[in-house]
Image (cartoon, rainbow, N blue to C red):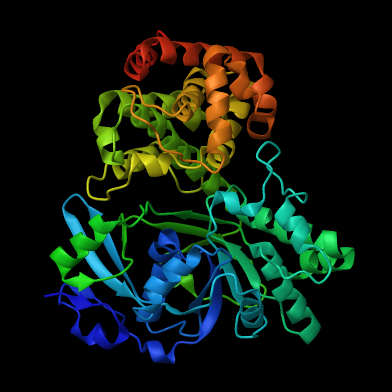
Amino acid sequence: MTVKLSSANLANLPASVAGPKYDRAALKAGIVHFGVGNFHRSHQAVYLDELFNSGVGHDWALVGAGVFEGEKIGRGKLEEQDWLTTVVEQDEGHMSARVTGAMIDFLTPGDAAAIIERLADPAIKIVSLTITEGGYFIDPASGVFNPTHPDIVADAQPGATPKTVFGIILAGLVRRRGDGIVPFTVMSCDNIPHNGHVTSDGVIGLARLIDEDLAAWVGGNVAFPNAMVDRITPATSDRERAILAKDFGVEDNWPVFCEPFRQWVLEDNFTDGRPPLEKVGVQFVRDVAPYELMKIRILNGGHAAIAYPAGLMDIHFVHEAMQEPLVRGFLDKLEHDEIIPTVPPVPDTVLEDYYQLIEKRFSNPKIGDTVRRLCLDGSNRQPKFIIPTIADRLKAGKSVAGLALESALWCRYCFGTTDSGAVIEPNDPSWDRLQATAKAAKEAPAAWLAMDDIYGDVGRATAFVEAFAHALNVLWTDGTRATLTRYLAGKL
């Protein structure tokens, strides 16, 4: 017998499942969040749920929002269960479930008028975002906001109904400015270097297309704190729903499974107050940059390192990739030889200890994270997680053999078949372009690096061009296993 998740059934949850210790009916909205996916519900929403359980912060409840039609599906699943989510933490020897209730509403995705109306409410003091790396309108090669993107240009037209996150946020700020209300803080929770600055560039860049005075007002009055966020959270499938029902007796339309580890390092920079999240483990610091660079290079770069060789070797789960000595060895050698040496010191952190923790987290056999998820969206992720490290190595005159191999593995993956000949289904917003370029690169490796919007100057650096071409040729001649074997032996 299972319990269907809903407010009415909270009192009937199985004894093994924790529920909210607060009165959800007494919560008041203080945060509008764009991008109500799995990561947000395993991270920010969990921190807030813990805060509310401690008896404080009850006027900081979450209201969901979104701009894409597809987000209506998730909204519908959550609406059926009164915006509740079951969060299941898993690792070897540990599994626990809790129902979180920090979200109290979810505005219809794409309903700009309703979302702007809520943003104009003085009770809303923070607007937060988990819209993934691709949602910030960043030019991959330069790493800065692209004001010529058609969606941004459309939002800047006089009288336009905004359709982008930045357009809706800006419209909300304009309403508050006109009403004499303190502007809300805009808080990115995405895996992007300097995510607060990037968000600021997007909102101010759009404002500049509309009115220079508006852009100056946003720049002078709105806070955009930088943050580093971390928790491995795979996509939900029928597998997770079945485990929750079988092991915990709860029926949830959209549960979240994640690792026990979580981290949130945040600059204490807010225009109109914030919840006291330090009470539940959030680290408030003056400068997030050292933490985020460590995480983006060692963890996110590490994910990229294991993703593509594992994908080419037909490995399904991430923990299975870590059980393959060639993949684990490639990660270890690449991290120690080329990635970790580019990471400056981090306060109160030993980088080797951090790497060992990452290795353990990647090896978690319970989490069910897939190699395909790690391979997703390389055209947006590589310029953020890998290519800046290559640039730093080149600038220092250091070897890039391992990073060139990682890039060659990505190229080989985008060809669209594994080493066994199995078809790789499209796995990137730019898949058609990537596949065509990867096919050209089989005979002419430089074609891949000629994607200037992705590689920029790195793609023209002789040392990298030569190392990449060599690695790709060996991959095509000998296959992934033999290539990794040669690299680990120092003979690539």
In percent of width and height, residue 81 lies at 34, 78
In percent of width and height, residue 453 lies at 68, 34
Task: Work out whether residue 351 can be spotted.
Answer: no
Residue 367 higher or lower than 34, as above or below: above
Q: For the image shown, how many numbered marks are present on the structure?
A: 0
Residue at 43% across, 14% down: 476
Residue situated in front as seen by the camera: 148 or 285: 148
| Figure quadrant of the C terminus | top left
In percent of width and height, residue 362 lies at 32, 42
Residue at 40% across, 80% down: 52
Residue situated in front as seen by the camera: 100 or 480: 480
Residue situated in front as seen by the camera: 51 or 309: 309
Residue 410 higher or lower than 280, as above or below: above
Left or right for 150, reference 419: right
Residue situated in front as seen by the camera: 395 or 415: 415
Left or right for 75, reference 361: right
Q: Quadrant of residue 9?
A: bottom left
Left or right for 246, reference 74: left
In percent of width and height, residue 77 lies at 37, 71
Residue at 65% across, 28% down: 451
Residue 169 higher or lower than 314, as above or below: below
| Figure quadrant of the N terminus | bottom left
- For this orientation, the residue located farthest to the left is 1
